[in-house]
Image: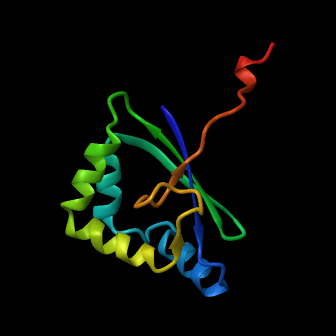
């Protein structure tokens, strides 16, 4: 299943540069990549325009976002990573209270068009 999520970065050049450096190939701590894969996330990409980020995830059948959140809450490595990200990430103004990344609703698919 595909999931598309959005979040903003602090709109400052240094915050954006830091975020990109932290996500460069080989820069993400192995424990973070393992937590993503272990949750049943098969593929994940993050795109940026300006200070807006878009995450696209492909998940295995049975992926459980609540179980991933619980595992993340119990992981010191993930909590340290999230604290680092909190320094530069800003939830969208319409995000649910307490959430970070906001899911996007698909409103168009070429596959569904005649």
Q: Quadrant of residue 97?
A: bottom left
Tell me what residue is drawn at x 28 percent, y 63 percent: 31
Foreground pick, 25 / 53: 53
In this rendering, position of residue 12 left or right of residue 43: right
Tell me what residue is drawn at x 71 percent, y 20 percent: 111
Q: Position of residue 46 (x, y in %)?
A: 57, 57
In the displayed structure, would residue 2 be above or below residue 34? above
In the displayed structure, would residue 61 be above or below residue 3? above
How many numbered circles does the render carry?
Answer: 0
Q: Which residue reaches farthest right?
A: 114
Q: Quadrant of residue 49?
A: bottom right
In this rendering, position of residue 101 left or right of residue 82: right
Q: Quadrant of the C terminus?
A: top right
Q: Position of residue 70 (x, y in %)?
A: 23, 52
Tell me what residue is drawn at x 38 percent, y 32 percent: 60
Q: Which residue reaches farthest bottom?
A: 14
What colouring does the structure picture have?
rainbow
In the displayed structure, would residue 103 be above or below residue 60? below
Tell me what residue is drawn at x 39 percent, y 43 percent: 41
Q: Which residue reaches farthest top?
A: 114
Q: Position of residue 19 (x, y in %)?
A: 53, 75
Q: Position of residue 90 (x, y in %)?
A: 54, 70
């Amino acid at each position: 299943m595909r999931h598309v999520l959005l979040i903003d970065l602090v709109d400052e050049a240094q915050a954006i540069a830091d975020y990109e450096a932290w996500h460069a190939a080989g820069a993400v701590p192995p424990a973070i990549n393992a937590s993503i894969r272990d949750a049943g996330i098969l593929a994940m990409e993050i795109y940026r325009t300006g200070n807006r980020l878009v995450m696209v995830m492909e998940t295995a059948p049975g992926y459980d976002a609540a179980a991933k959140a619980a595992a993340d809450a119990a992981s010191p490595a993930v909590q340290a990573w999230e604290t680092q990200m909190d320094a530069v990430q800003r939830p969208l103004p319409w995000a649910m209270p307490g959430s970070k990344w906001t899911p996007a609703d698909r409103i168009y698919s070429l596959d569904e068009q005649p």
